[in-house]
Image: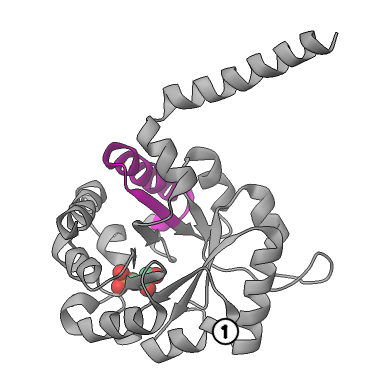
Amino acid sequence: MSSIFCSILLSGVFLVFGSLFLYLSVDYIFILFFMEFPLIVTNFKAYDEGFGEDAVRMAKIHEKVSKETGVVIGVAVSAIDLKAIVEAVSIPVFVQHIDPITPGRGTGSVLPEAVKDIGAYGTLLNHSEKRLSREVLLASIKRAKEVGLRHIVCAESADEAEGFLEFEPEMLAVEPPELIGGDISVSTANPEIIDRTVEKIGRGKVIVGAGIKDARDVKIAFELGASGILLASGVMKSADPEAVLRDLVEGIKQAG
Ligand code: G3P
């Protein structure tokens, strides 16, 4: 009896993993399950192109480039579009923010349990456009860990990033606010901030953003020790987001 049960169980396991391998390449499965970096994350922000059906279409473009190039490309989306996007793609989907509440009272808040239940991979925290006090940030990181959400904590300077280390964040993204949404990238205008952040935080944890647009920006950031890129307008406002994403991946490859 028990051997029949075991055979049924084993067939089920083979069926599930077999289908998964057919759908995704072996390399891609390895990257998704065992590696976090190098990582590119596009923040959809509140752009016209970043909500509703457009957001799902945009997420699918990210998935396509990620699968074809083998580089992990995630998206950071609003809580409103989270479910539709999680259901449509198999790349890491971050929500742009969570509130440090527990189930119960909390009108208008983004409940971490709900985000996890939908199937999000993680959350951004303390983005320059959604700043938190240190107390709220610490509480949010704790809640993210409790429910099992990966998290990228944003900082505006190398010193601020260093000051967050005591909260034991998983990933730290440094973005000089004056360069966000602009034409000149952090890699060109302020490579020192990348250098200093990597020096203070160490390799394998630092993500860089602000004005990143192309392979050259990515290459400089990675050569300075960054492990990931966080960007928005370069992809969201482009007439050809797929071409931009492929170019960004090229930058990672050029940096070796
Ligand atoms: O979250 C990413 C971000 O703030 C950078 O935006 O438009 O300068 O790439 P952008």
Dominant secondary structure of the magenta stretch? Answer: helix
Depth check: give the residue in front, 131 or 143. Answer: 143
The picture places residue 235, in percent across and down from the top left corner, at 28, 58
Q: Residues within 10 Å of mark 1 (few under 14, many from 20)?
A: few
Depth check: give the residue in front, 88 or 125. Answer: 125
Identify the residue at horizontal 28%, vertical 79% (top origin): 194
Q: Within the image, what quadrant is residue 174 found in? A: bottom left
The image shows residue 162, relative to residue 66, as above or below, that is below
The picture places residue 156, in percent across and down from the top left corner, at 40, 85
Disc 1 target residue: 166
Which segment did they paint magenta? 50-75
Depth check: give the residue in front, 82 or 50. Answer: 82
Q: Is residue 30 left or right of residue 237?
A: right
Please identify the quadrant where the N terminus is shown.
top right
- What colouring does the structure picture have? one colour
The reply to whether residue 194 is visible in this rendering is yes
Q: Is residue 66 magenta?
A: yes
Identify the residue at horizontal 65%, vertical 56% (top origin): 115
Depth check: give the residue in front, 4 or 58. Answer: 4
Q: Is residue 240 magenta?
A: no
Identify the residue at horizontal 62%, vertical 73% (top origin): 141
Q: Within the image, what quadrant is residue 132 found in? A: bottom right
Identify the residue at horizontal 49%, vertical 58% (top origin): 77
Q: Quadrant of ligand 1?
A: bottom left
The reply to whether residue 231 is visible in this rendering is no
The secondary structure type at the circle numbered 1 is helix
The image shows residue 126, relative to residue 81, as above or below, that is below
Name which residue type carries label 1.
Glu
